[in-house]
Image: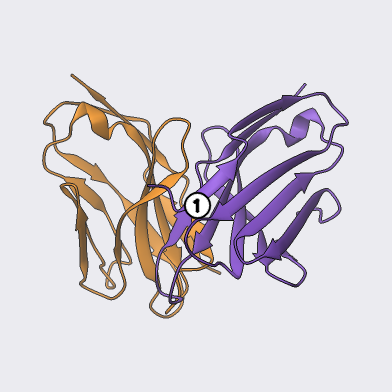
Chain colours: A purple, B orange
Amino acid sequence: GAVVSQHPSWVICKSGTSVKIECRSLDFQATTMFWYRQFPKQSLMLMATSNEGSKATYEQGVEKDKFLINHASLTLSTLTVTSAHPEDSSFYICSAPQGASNQPQHFGDGTRLSIL
Amino acid sequence: GNSVTQMEGPVTLSEEAFLTINCTYTATGYPSLFWYVQYPGEGLQLLLKATKADDKGSNKGFEATYRKETTSFHLEKGSVQVSDSAVYFCALSREGSARQLTFGSGTQLTVLP
């Protein structure tokens, strides 16, 4: 079964709305989680590293005020797309490593965000 | 910096055909290498991995060998099935870690019955 749960899986909303996406690690603690964005027929681009109890680390070119990340507990990270616009429409995927640093990450099933 | 170059798709094969998806990388040191698969509407699933030179990762009939001399990690399967239709991503992480991943552009595979 899934070890990383991502919710919602699909959301459609009007321009200007803020949307929150949750990423939960199931049965394990994740002090670090990663958020990726995937455009149609393209690869995943790392947006930010979510750190439990501290500020997220954003990749170059990613607006931190636009994509708010909160990692309030050892099993939950949230990504909030603030005042979303059509260009924010995309597939967002989170991942969480489990165990030693050389162990592969577990990915969520992704959230398809469509802004009208 | 690190980068992954992956064979462009889409790739369309008949069932039971042989599959090769090329992947080459640029990185310092000895990164770990991965193949992930993404089925429609889903997140990524780890298919196989290799952590050092000459390692062969294998899973579900897929194989890939870590070739340091050619900086390659090509994915192969001897006989594909319709259920293998998906997008395949080659990825690497920095030496000793599977944390921050650098992905290739992905290759769409369609297997026809």
Give the vertical position of B45 relative to A18 (above or below): below
Identified at 75% across, 56% down, the residue is: A69
Q: Position of residue B75 (x, y in %)?
A: 25, 50
Within 10 Å of disc 1 (Cα), the crowding (few <14, some 14-19, many 20+) is many
Identified at 37% across, 70% down, the residue is: B32
Q: Position of residue A28 (x, y in %)?
A: 49, 65
Q: Chain of mark 1?
A: A
Identified at 74% across, 36% down, the residue is: A88
Describe residue B82's horizontal placement relative to residue A68 as left or right: left
Quick one: A110 or B28, which is closer to the camera? A110
Identified at 35% across, 34% down, the residue is: B86
Asked which quadrant contains residue A10, the reply is top right
- Which quarter of the figure is the C terminus of chain B placed in? top left
Going by the numbered disc 1, the residue's amino acid type is Val
Asked which quadrant contains residue A105, the reply is bottom left
Q: Position of residue A58 (x, y in %)?
A: 73, 62
Residue located beneath label 1 in the image: A4
Describe residue B53's horizontal placement relative to residue A1 as left or right: left
Q: Position of residue B72 (x, y in %)?
A: 30, 62
Tell me if I can see residue B37 in this picture: yes
Quick one: A38 or B4, which is closer to the camera? A38
Tell me if I can see residue A61 in this picture: no
**Mark 1, secondary structure of its residue:** strand
- Which quarter of the figure is the N terminus of chain B placed in? bottom right
Give the vertical position of B4 relative to B82 (above or below): below
Give the vertical position of B34 relative to B82 (above or below): below
